[in-house]
Image: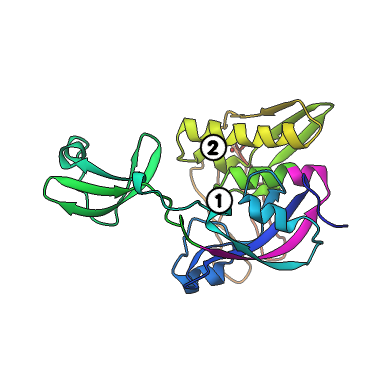
Amino acid sequence: MPIEYGDFVRLEFTGKVKETGEVFDTTSEEVAIEAGLFVEQKQYGPIPIIVGGDHLLKAIDDAVVGLDEGDSKIIDVTPENGFGQRDAKLIQLVPMKEFKKQGMNPYPGMEVTAEGHTGRILTINGGRVKVDFNHHLAGKNLEYSVVVSKIIEDEEEKIKGMIQLHYAYPNLDINKTEIRIDGKKVSIKLDDITKYDQKSYMDITFARFRISKDIWENLDYEKVEFIDEFEKKEPEAETKEQTEEITIEGTPTEEITTEGTPTEEITAEEEPKTTTETPLESEE
């Protein structure tokens, strides 16, 4: 069935600068390695998106509509439909003293953030630093090669897809994430490993908000809750043994002796029965 706006799909894609063939983004680990873009902490493979959900460029969303599972397409994206034309007003001179106040030593190519905008240092001349706040792909014609890996139909898989998209934690095992649906409410208990995420509280809250927003706007639910549970971990029971000796037929006889219990001999003909106590584990 052809893709429509609002559908949940998994896409593979590679983006290139059309004039040079330079790869700037990809979901393929192999392509990332070849292009020198590989990041060890990043998860590669088809990404889950909502078509028309502003997860990718609008030009890509529009081009995907009408495709079917397994289809591929080459999409040309002009600057107007991509990251805009370059704007000379976004190239600014910043006094060196502003960097020194922050304890920074600027250098050409360094990325900086000012008032929520990310820029790249172009040159340093005396006491002034030239910073370009244009997007690094502004003014460039782009080419995306896209493959529709899957059209997601299952409701729970759609929710898990949004978790994978917005909660980009490299060690997250989505199969250990629990989803409970009760009427108009969705309860999410993330994989326990996320309890050790080093992201800031603000970043985690924002990721959860984006997951919730996509669920509200694209699925028939009104409330999303995230469950964080911490259980007391019981210490492993300690056993106090005075002497331990083992007897095996054909070897020197040894005895297992525990204070207050009778002596017991164990031979190879009679296998000992072992009892293992497993402590409770906390659940993150």
State the quadrant of the N terminus. Answer: bottom right
Packing grade of label 1 (10 A; few <14, some 14-19, many >=20) is few
- In the image, taking residue 125 as reference, residue 43 lies left or right, namely right
Residue 176 position, x and y percent, is 68, 45
In front: 251, or 185? 185
Q: Amino acid at mark 2?
A: Lys
- Please tell me in which quadrant of the rendered image residue 192 appears: top right
Instruction: Tell me which secondary structure the magenta stretch mostly adopts.
Output: strand
Residue 220 percent coordinates (x, y): 81, 32
Secondary structure beneath label 1: loop
Write down the quadrant of residue 99 in the picture. Answer: top left
Residue kind at label 1, given as amino acid type: Asn
Disc 2 target residue: 195
Mark 1–mark 2 distance (CA, rounded to whole Å): 11 Å
Q: Of residues 258 and 237, which is closer to you in this image?
A: 237
Give the x, y percent position of residue 206: 54, 33
Residue that lies at the very extreme toward the left in this rendered image: 126
Question: Residue, x 65% and y 43% (percent of image)?
Answer: 163
**Is-magenta flag for residue 153?**
yes
- Say whether residue 279 is magenta: no
Query: Where's residue 224, x and y in %?
Result: 70, 28
Density class for disc 2 (Cα within 10 Å; few <14, some 14-19, many ≥20) is few
Q: Which mark is residue 251?
A: none
Q: Which mark is residue 171?
A: 1
Which sits earlier in the primary sequence, circle 1 or circle 2? 1
Pick the front one: 280 or 39: 39
Query: Helix or strand or loop: what does disc 2 sit on?
Result: helix
Residue 283: tell me if it is visible: no
Q: Is residue 44 above or below residue 101?
A: below
The quadrant of the picture occupied by the C terminus is top right
Q: Which residues are magenta?
A: 141-158
